[in-house]
Image: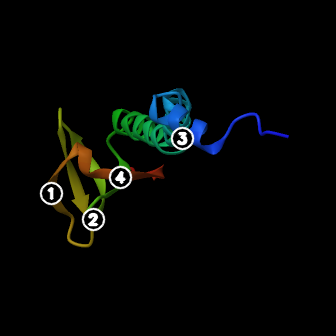
């Protein structure tokens, strides 16, 4: 009994470009997995962060990317002023440096 396709025929078929469709399908599947596992979660996180920055208001307690914790005193276009304890220093910070907002507002 003779095998239907010999190993040499398979090698010639792949060398002639017959395997390019399989390779394209594999690459498309790998890209889809990377998109679902890496790109989509990052886009969601970026969108949530942008919404948080747009919702900033005077009196919010925030933390900057440098670890500075303070209370928002004034909000301008792309920067804001924070009051930092214990000496009530007033510092100017880029709006994009804010990484988190605590829920409790300060009235003063």
Q: Secondary structure at mark 2?
A: loop
Query: In whole angstroms, how far apart are the C-alphas of marks 1 and 3?
Result: 69 Å
Report how far apart the C-alphas of labels 4 and 2 lie in the structure: 10 Å
* Residue designated by label 2: 68
Mark 1 highlights which residue?
Answer: 91
Q: Are marks 4 and 1 in contact (CB under 8 Å)?
A: no
Of callouts 1 and 2, which one flags the residue occurring earlier in the amino acid sequence? 2
Label 4: which secondary element: strand
Quickly name the residue at label 4: 99
Going from N to C along the chain, the mark reached first, 2 or 3, is 3
Q: Assess disc 3: are there few (<14), some (14-19) or many (≥20) residues with their C-alpha within 10 Å of its C-alpha.
A: few
Percent x, y for residue 95? 23, 43
Label 4 vs label 2, nearer the camera: 4
Residue under numbered circle 3: 11
Q: In the depicted view, which residue is nearer to us: 43 or 55?
A: 43
Image position, residue 1 (x, y; %):
85, 40
From the viewer's perspective, is residue 69 above or below residue 31? Answer: below
Mark toward the viewer: 2 or 3: 3
* 69 to the left or right of 25: left
Q: Nearer the viewer, mark 3 or mark 4?
A: 3
In what element is the residue under mark 3? helix
Looking at the image, residue 2 sits to the left or right of residue 22; the answer is right
Q: Residue furthest right?
A: 1
Q: Nearer the viewer, residue 57 or 17?
A: 17
**Residue 6 place in picture, x, y as percent:** 67, 40
Label 1 crowding class (10 Å Cα cut-off): few <14, some 14-19, many 20+?
few
Answer whether labels 3 and 4 touch (C-beta < 8 Å).
no
Q: Residue at x 17, y 32 (%)?
A: 77
Residue at (42% x, 34% y) in the render: 47
Q: At 40% across and 41% down in the image, what residue appears? A: 49
Residue that extends furthest to the front in the rendered view of this protein: 1
């Amino acid at each position: 009994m003779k095998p239907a396709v010999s190993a040499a025929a398979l090698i010639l078929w792949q060398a002639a470009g017959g395997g390019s469709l399989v390779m394209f399908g594999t690459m498309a599947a790998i890209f889809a997995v990377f998109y679902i596992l890496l790109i989509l979660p990052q886009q969601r996180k970026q969108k949530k962060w942008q919404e948080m920055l747009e919702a900033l208001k005077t009196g919010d307690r925030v933390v900057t990317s440098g670890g500075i914790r303070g209370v928002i005193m004034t909000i301008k276009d792309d920067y804001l002023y924070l009051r930092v304890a214990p000496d009530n220093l007033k510092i100017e910070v880029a709006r994009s440096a804010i990484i988190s907002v605590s829920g409790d507002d300060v009235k003063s």
